[in-house]
Image (cartoon, rainbow, N blue to C red):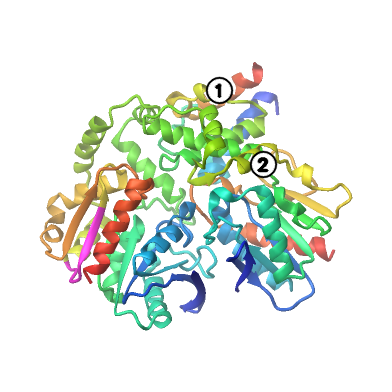
Amino acid sequence: MIASYRFAGQDEYCLRIDRGRDTRILVIQPLFEEANRTRHMLAEMMRALDGHGIDSLMPDLPGRNESAFPQHQADLDLWRNALAECAEQLGPVTHIAALRGGALLIDCAPQLPVWRLAPAKGEQLLRTMIRARLTADREAGKHVTEEMLIEAAQTGPVELAGNLFGTAMIDGLKNARPEDVLDIRRNSRTVRNSSEPDFVTGMIDGKALWLRAEPEHNAVMSQAIADDIAEWIRP
Amino acid sequence: MTRHFTFECTGETLVGSIDDAKGERGLLIVSGGNEIRAGAFGGMARLARDLAASGITVMRYDRRGIGDSSGENSGFEGSADDISAALTAFRKQCPGLREIAAFGNCDAASALALFAGKAGFAALALANPWTIETPDNAEEGETAAMPASAIRSRYLAKLRDPRELWRLVTGGVNLRKLVKGLRQAAAKQEVSGLGERLMKALSGQTVPVAILIASRDRTALAFLSIWDSASGEAARTNGYIMLQQIHSASHSFAGEDDHRWLVEQLIAVVHSC
Amino acid sequence: MNQDQQVEQVVRSVLCDILGLGEEQVAGFDADTELFGALPELDSMAVAGLLTEMEDRLDILIEDDEVDGELFENFGNLVNFAKAKLAA
């Protein structure tokens, strides 16, 4: 259940269910605090995949969760490299499953079939974190604007919603869109969750867990994701 | 280097993480709310590394139904078995430790106050203990409608006007005045069942207990109103208990100064074992 | 469903997701339903998430200076704000 992969001279944590089977999914979590909120749901999802006879890996990204890698030195490209390293060391990986901002990193293994739930634009994620920072600053009586934060990031790490950001991450997020990293020829399935007003090719029953104020569980979503992935892999 | 492992609790598989240090004392961190063991913003992972750097071995874990662990989440009220199992696992993983203390924030502090006696810690650090009763509004066939966080704030809404709250956020309110008013309002609250149980549990502690308070945190203010009331007298006069306050509104000791203060307090508690 | 009803539905849906409430509960929200007392412990992340989701699902832009205490006072204010944004 507990594995590790080597990246930038450090061991990084990777949750794993591996029984040496043929199908192995690399799970790319949502980014930043959305990962905390969906952590248990995804761990249970991996156990449900296990029930379908499917192995899975869910690595920590450098600077996230258990990682001691300096947060502000991470950017989207570094994360793609880390995912590729993890797949190389703990694979072979046959499919990718990505949620929310995780969908921005699926080009870590561009040749693999990819399953995506509610892909999120980098700009949207960044906007929420900047807003949270501005709201918190106003609560403390400080006058800060978005422009000031972006400028500050040029010369040193900036804290947004509890995470440290370097300018490369901020720029990367501003410009990252899920469709830009999904080659049209790639075998893919995209689903949205049932609170979305519109959907593409499928709908997963369950609320947007990643928007809550604190981590919660959704057992229905765990099972629904695993079932949908299993069905997609072996229709 | 942090090391990770699994351990058993009532047949479920829990995951723990340990930062080893050379000393003979350890600290078990019990997570609050539904937070994963690394903590919101990786705060607990960082705290553990900081404490280990000062010679204290630290363990954190996901209780049942949280993070990487299996099983059902029974909240802080149902976490007694998880706390015991974690302490057992800690001793097994680190047989060289002489004394093990425990730290919890918010409802984890309450859980430790209520259940730690059975487990056998050498000292306790309880930060901003949670005393707010979840309203029993479950009707037949329904489960509690609101998540804990929404319930918390509904309670808080009784204490003050919503517009006031927003003026606070946008900087239009004198914080000191608001806090004074809050404390007065809170003092008039009926002491809940949970508050009573907590005071009783605290009055019976026979190991060093440090109650760590962020003096402008709303949860801490609610605790203080009970601590200061008649219900809190036996706890207040228990010589094992010391109250330490930092002048801050941060419930989770975010921010450099708060973090540094918390680390100092925890080191002191561990060395009081 | 006309556009006004659609906007209302989207706002209900976002609140559902952010607050973790059941659909039946949120369906019961009317113009006077107080939001502030029901929002999760004043959490800058939750408020930020709510605003960004409304922007994304309604395809509107919310400036920081448009957000004040009145906006979150009740369900009606939030919905009216969203409708006004779409009409602009």
Q: Residue at coordinates 59% horizontally, 59% vertically from top-left? A: A41
Amino acid marked by disc 1: Phe
Q: Can residue B26 be seen in this view?
A: yes
A1 vs B178, left or right, is right
Q: Distance between the residues labelled 1 and 2?
A: 32 Å
Q: Mark 2 lies on which chain?
A: A
Question: Which region of the structure is painted magenta?
Answer: B204-212
Q: Does the CB distance between marks 1 and 2 fall below 8 Å? A: no
Secondary element at tag 1: helix
Q: Identify the residue at horizontal 78%, vertical 56% (top origin).
A: A114
Q: Which chain carries label 1?
A: C
Report the side of B253 relative to A68 (left or right): left
Q: From the viewer's perspective, is B188 left or right of A2?
A: left
Residue A172's tag is 2
Where does the C terminus of chain A fall, quadrant-wise?
Answer: bottom right
Q: How crowded is mark 1: few (under 14 residues within 10 Å), some or many (20 or more)?
A: some
Residue positioned most to the top: C88
Q: Mark 1 points at which residue?
A: C81
